[in-house]
Amino acid sequence: MDNNGQIMKKLRVFEAFAGIGAQATALDRLGFDYEVVGISEWFTDAIICYDAIHNKSECAPTFPDKSEQVEYLKQFQFSRDSVRPSKLELMNSDYIELLYAANKNSKNFGSITQIKGANMPEIDLLVYTFPCQDLSTGGKGLGMKKGSGTRSCLLWEIERILLELKEYNRLPEYLLLENVRNILAPVYKEDFNAWLSFLESLGYSNDECMVLNALDFGIPQERERAFIVSHLGDKLNVSAKIQKKQRVYDFNRFFRNDYSNETYKKEADIAQLNKTPSREKMWRINGKELNENTVVRTITCNMDRTHTAALFKYSGVKGDSYRRLTIREAFLLMGFTEKEYESTLHLEFTYRKMNKLIGNSIVVDVLTEVFRAMFGEKYVRGN
């Protein structure tokens, strides 16, 4: 109950473009009484990894045969590479089984393009982290113009869904947008302002756009992201409530270089690179000498690139050369725990697959502070 003796309801959350669910992880950290009533995700690896982290189950206890699993999954559109649709019939039985269980466990509605407002549950908070590839400085700058067919223009599927929800008088009270800082670039200003105007036409008040850096929230990763809170009613003035931390870090909390630990040694070997001229160039740009104040660049979905998050000197299976962050370290630098990382190990995804998933996620510590500033103790269990 609240201070007025009213029974508090759970915060009902829908994660659009859910990825591996940093949003739900942040709500867990706050001890909120919430329920993820649905997610939208079409990338199959992300769906399976989301389930492993959040549902604490490797698979459903019983399964129908593969043909029935495929028949159920056919109502959704999926992608194995996150770029183009994939045929279920070409996936092996073990993968189909994982996807079948994960889709059911996570209440996945599939691709955002297929979701109908009429079929969506009651929602209090909609979090939408639409694809950034066409806005990012590392992309081709194709933009998010409505009808352009770019991946970033999937934002406008949220417009369609909100309009459909309005017809049923079921607009969520809170919206949270997250994307790369470059969404604010002058070249995208017209489309960005069109989006904000649309939300205002529905009755939402948009808070000031916040550019938040993980460095200000206890994470030694230079990672800036844009966040906009929209409230059906008055502004929440979230930016004024955000509490940043002093930029003091202990990088050893995030780095695993005790190679007497066989697990850490194996993971470091997997992260090692051959010593080639191109990797020598990578070292000159990204090389790190370790100390407690070490800070890494933005973790991307590909840490084998010229500008990667960080390189460290390493002697391993490939001799004396360099290594990238291990996936365990990348999880920690995105605010996840080792336990949450280890919950994915049974999937046996490759380094590249896991790199793509974690690089496309959101820093949990930043989201935690955003949600705290949005809701205070309103949804804290026991209040």
Image (cartoon, rainbow, N blue to C red):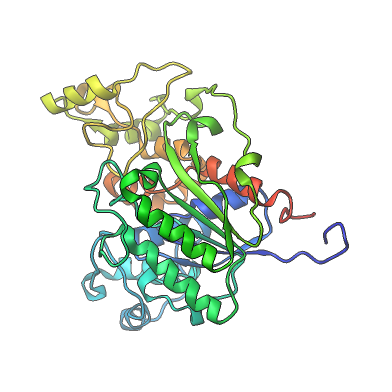
View extreme (left): residue: 277
Q: Which residue is nearer to you in this view: 285 or 197?
A: 197
377 left or right, relative to 140: right
229 left or right, relative to 152: right
Q: Residue at x 33, y 83 (%)?
A: 71
**Placement of 212 over or under 354, stated as above or below:** above
**Placement of 351 over or under 66, stated as above or below:** above
Place of residue 255 in the rendered image (x, y in percent of width and height, measured from the top left): 43, 28
Q: Residue at x 54, y 76 (%)?
A: 166
**Placement of 40 over or under 68, stated as above or below:** above
The image quadrant that residue 50 belongs to is bottom left
Quadrant of image for the C terminus: bottom right
Q: Which residue is nearer to you in this view: 25 or 337?
A: 25
146 left or right, relative to 3: left
Place of residue 302 in the rendered image (x, y in percent of width and height, measured from the top left): 27, 42
**Placement of 340 over or under 256, stated as above or below:** below
Q: Residue at x 36, y 72 (%)?
A: 113
Quadrant of image for the N terminus: bottom right
The image quadrant that residue 331 belongs to is top left
Count all numbered tags in the image, as a single digit.
0
Q: Is residue 376 visible?
A: yes
Q: Is residue 347 visible?
A: no
Place of residue 368 in the rendered image (x, y in percent of width and height, measured from the top left): 59, 45
Place of residue 241 in the rendered image (x, y in percent of width and height, measured from the top left): 66, 41
6 left or right, relative to 351: right
Q: Which residue is nearer to you in this view: 176 or 314?
A: 176
The image quadrant that residue 270 belongs to is top left
Q: Residue at x 73, y 66 (%)?
A: 9
